[in-house]
Every structure is written in C-alpha cells, then in structure tokens.
Image (cartoon, rainbow, N blue to C red):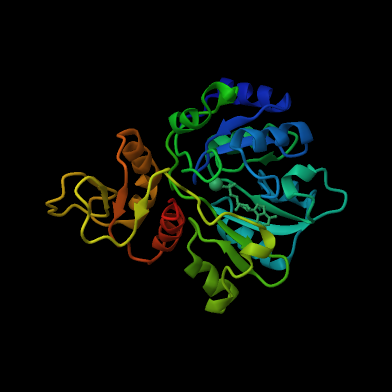
C-alpha cells in the first residue's frame, strides 16, 4: 500500500498535541495516543468508556524503543525475532524509570507491548518520539473496527483524525502472552496458540488461567454487536441473520457467508465487518453455525463466545 506522507504528518500533529487518533493495524484499527502523556491517554478511556482498571497495549517501532520502558528476557527476544513485527502482544516487566503514563498500566508494574506490521502505522511510529498506547478503536465491549469507516461509526467527530490504512488484513485482535513469570496466553488471537505452545512447551491446562489476576474484573461480555447471538446453530429461527463459513444450500432466508469455502483466515477477516452489516440492517438476533476450533478458529470462537453473552 502506498504511504501518504501528508496523512502521516497530520496524525503526528494531533498526537504531538495530546489528541487521540484512529490508526490502522494489521489486526484491527487502534485508538492511539502518546503513551507517555497522562492527558492524552486519559482521553482514550473517556472516548472508549473503558474502565480505568483495564490496561492498554503500547505499540512500539522496534526493540531498541521497548528497552527504554521494559525489562526484556530471553523468551521475549526469541519470540520477537520469530514473530515481530506481527500480531502478538507481550506482557513484560515495566522499568522503574519508564516514562509510560500510569493510566496505561493502571499503576501496575507490567506493560503489554506490541510491534505492529502495518506499513502505515510503522511509518507513523518511526516519526514519533514516543510509543503509542492503542487499544482497539471501538466503544468498550463492542465490535472492533477494521476500517476507517468503522472507526468513524464508533466515535463520529469525537476524534480529530483517523489515519487511513485500508481494511485490516487479519481482522482479529493480537494474541496476548504473559512473559512475567511462567509464560501464559492471556488472550487467543491472530497468532495461533499452536505455534506458541510448541515453542514454549506449554502444558495445555496452563493456558489462559491467569486472565483474571492480570486483568481484574474484565467483563465476560465483549466483542458484542449489541444483539443476541447464538452459537453452534443447526436450525436458525426464521428472522435471524445466519452466519455461515462456506457457500452451501440453505433454505434459510437471511444468509451471510464469512468465506466461500470455509477458509478460517477469511472467516476471521470478514467476521467483524459482517456483524456490523447485520447490525445496520436492524436484525434482532444472530445465529452462527459451528466453526471448527482449528488454527485461527480458536480465536474466532473465543470472540463469538464472548459476544454470545449479550442478553
Ligand atoms: P484492546 O483494548 O481491545 O486492545 O485489548 C487489550 C487487552 O490487553 C485487554 O484485554 C487488556 O486488559 C490487555 N492488557 C493490556 N495491558 C495488559 C497488562 N499489563 N497485563 C495483562 N493484560 C493487559
Ligand atoms: Mg478490544
């Protein structure tokens, strides 16, 4: 994708002035602010209606930059070399002399860091004197945004600028791994846990058990289109929107295909945008057919499970 330098300049101008800016990443769009500024990062919480206790992921350009703020360890270096820039976030120990705003960490001594791959965001990061705190660009617990228009839908003119980077290529949030103490996956995501399990020799039952400790009070409902959503449906109700993962005969009236042939990467890429379309069409509920738990299917099912908690 061609990078428009005058757009990068505009985004930098607003960020330098403690404003929030919508930014593209390969996973989903982020709502970004200067991670060293209390003023800028407090605006993220206000705009997203995000509880203060929920810490933010900070986006860095390179290893040298993250070393200013965090203690790094061998496991991190190994995974960084293998997967970064890419769709994985690491929880590391914060350095005492780090400039990261306390808003970002909720006054804790850990920091979640990521190295996004999107060329537009990388160009922006390389022009800044600070890293970017950037949670997903959506109102808390709602569906993430995968295009500039989605971000506009979420925040209207409450944010000053959205940097356009086209549609997010992956369409699902990053995998989060805790590297303080024994490695653990805190959130399934775009980087598949099978790859991590093999490298770090996880025992299956150790996965994701710590979430509540590190992210206190995180709601079970998340990624919600704001209408009821049913999983593993074989018989949709007449007025439901039905999500299918491949083209096939269906006597149901309202079918939405996430992929032509059951390609789960395509399903991930189309999931949030299709949920937004369904919501705009004013359906009252959504039925989803069973989605295999293989590869990225694990993260897709995690999101759908949380979306299904809407009552
Ligand atoms: P989002 O805000 O949608 O980008 O999601 C970011 C996720 O990262 C949330 O679930 C946060 O609670 C989690 N997170 C951010 N910082 C930390 C941290 N220091 N430790 C554990 N989880 C974190
Ligand atoms: Mg989010």
Residue for point 32% across, 39% down? 278
**Residue 110 sits above or below residue 98 on the image:** below
**Residue 185 sits above or below residue 118 on the image:** below
For the question of whether residue 294 can be seen, the reply is yes
Residue for point 67% across, 41% down? 133
Q: Is residue 87 left or right of residue 215?
A: left
Residue 293, image x and y in percent?
A: 38, 66
Q: Is residue 141 left or right of residue 269?
A: right
Residue 23, image x and y in percent?
A: 56, 34
**Of all residues shown, which one is farthest toward the front?**
311
Identify which residue, 254 or 9, lies in the foreground: 254
For the question of whether residue 100 can be seen, the reply is no
Identify which residue, 101 or 278, lies in the foreground: 278
Tag count in the figure? 0
**Residue 250 sits above or below residue 16 on the image:** below
**Of all residues shown, which one is farthest toward the right?**
97
Q: Quadrant of residue 33?
A: top right
Q: Is residue 111 left or right of residue 259?
A: right
Residue for point 19% across, 52% down? 247
**Residue 186 sits above or below residue 20 on the image:** below
Q: Quadrant of residue 37?
A: top right
Identify which residue, 126 or 204, lies in the foreground: 204
Residue 100, image x and y in percent?
A: 78, 44
Q: Quadrant of the N terminus?
A: top left
Residue 139, image x and y in percent?
A: 54, 38
Residue for point 83% across, 47% down? 98
């Amino acid at each position: 994708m061609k990078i428009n330098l005058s757009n990068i300049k505009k985004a930098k101008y607003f960020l330098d002035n403690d404003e929030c800016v919508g930014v593209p990443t390969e996973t989903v769009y982020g709502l970004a602010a200067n991670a060293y500024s209390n003023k800028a990062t407090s605006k993220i919480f206000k705009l997203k209606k995000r509880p203060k206790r929920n810490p933010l992921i900070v986006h860095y350009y390179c290893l040298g930059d993250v070393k200013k703020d965090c203690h790094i360890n061998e496991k991190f270096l190994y995974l960084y070399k293998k997967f970064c820039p890419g769709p994985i976030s690491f929880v590391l120990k914060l350095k005492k002399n780090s400039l990261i705003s306390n808003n970002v960490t909720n006054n804790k001594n850990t920091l979640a860091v990521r190295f996004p791959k999107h060329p537009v965001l990388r160009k922006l990061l390389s022009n800044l004197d600070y890293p970017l705190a950037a949670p997903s660009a959506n109102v808390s617990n709602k569906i993430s945004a995968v295009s500039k228009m989605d971000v506009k839908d979420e925040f209207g003119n409450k944010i000053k600028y959205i940097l356009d980077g086209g549609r997010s290529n992956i369409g699902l949030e990053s995998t989060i791994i805790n590297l303080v103490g024994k490695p653990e996956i805190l959130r399934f995501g775009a980087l598949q846990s099978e790859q991590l399990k093999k490298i770090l020799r996880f025992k299956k039952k150790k996965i994701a058990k710590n979430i509540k400790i590190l992210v206190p009070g995180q709601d079970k409902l998340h990624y919600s289109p704001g209408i009821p959503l049913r999983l593993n449906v074989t018989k949709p109700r007449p007025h439901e929107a039905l999500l299918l993962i491949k083209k096939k005969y269906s006597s149901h009236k309202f079918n939405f295909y996430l992929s032509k042939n059951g390609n789960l990467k395509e399903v991930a890429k189309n999931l949030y945008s299709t949920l937004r379309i369904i919501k705009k069409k004013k359906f009252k509920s959504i039925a989803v057919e069973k989605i295999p738990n293989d590869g990225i299917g694990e993260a897709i099912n995690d999101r759908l499970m949380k979306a299904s908690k809407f009552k």
